[in-house]
Amino acid sequence: MKIRVLLFASLAQDVGRGELELNLSDNATVSDALAALSQDYPPISRYRSRLATAVNLDYVGPEHHLCDGDELAVIPPVSGG
């Protein structure tokens, strides 16, 4: 299956783009997608345990199953005042 990945803030800067396409096996989870992204884009692995994720605009956890055509948003931790 193919999903669209949106990267935000420092992740987009570190990877050099804010949008990616990712091919995954059927029944893949958000955790599987993050593992694949971390392998292809090492800067993502720095944040992996602290990332927020959303699928099709709804926040989800790592065990959420993805479907072909889903949009996965990957949001790094942010701080500010």
Image (cartoon, grey):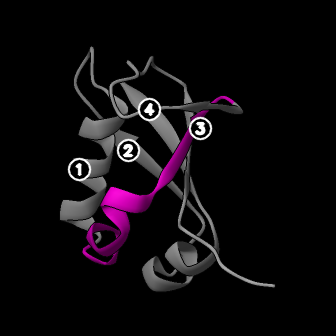
Q: Tell us which disc is closer to us: 2 or 1.
A: 1
- Examine the image and state in which quarter residue 54 appears: top right
Residue that mark 3 sits on: 54
Q: Please, what secondary structure does the residue beneath circle 1 have? A: helix
Which amino acid does the dot numbered 4 rest on? Answer: Gly
CA distance separating discs 3 and 2: 15 Å
C-alpha span from label 2 to label 1: 8 Å
Q: Is residue 1 left or right of residue 14?
A: left
What residue is disc 1 on?
A: 36
Q: Earlier in the sequence, mark 3 or mark 2?
A: 2
- Residue at figure coordinates x 38%, y 18% from the top left: 65
Tag nearer the camera, 4 or 3: 4
Q: Which residues are magenta?
A: 42-56
Q: Are marks 3 and 2 in contact (CB under 8 Å)?
A: no
Residue appearing at x 47%, y 34% in the figure: 3
Residue drawn where x is 31% and y is 49% of the image: 34
Residue 22: give its label.
Answer: 2
Q: Is residue 51 magenta?
A: yes
Circle 4 sits on which residue? 61
- Total marks placed: 4
Residue depth check, mark 2 versus mark 4: number of the one nearer the observer: 4
Choose the circle earlier in sequence order: 1 or 4.
1
Between the C-alphas of marks 3 and 1, the distance is 17 Å
Where is residue 23, by image quadrant? top left
Is 68 located above or below residue 10 in the figure?
above
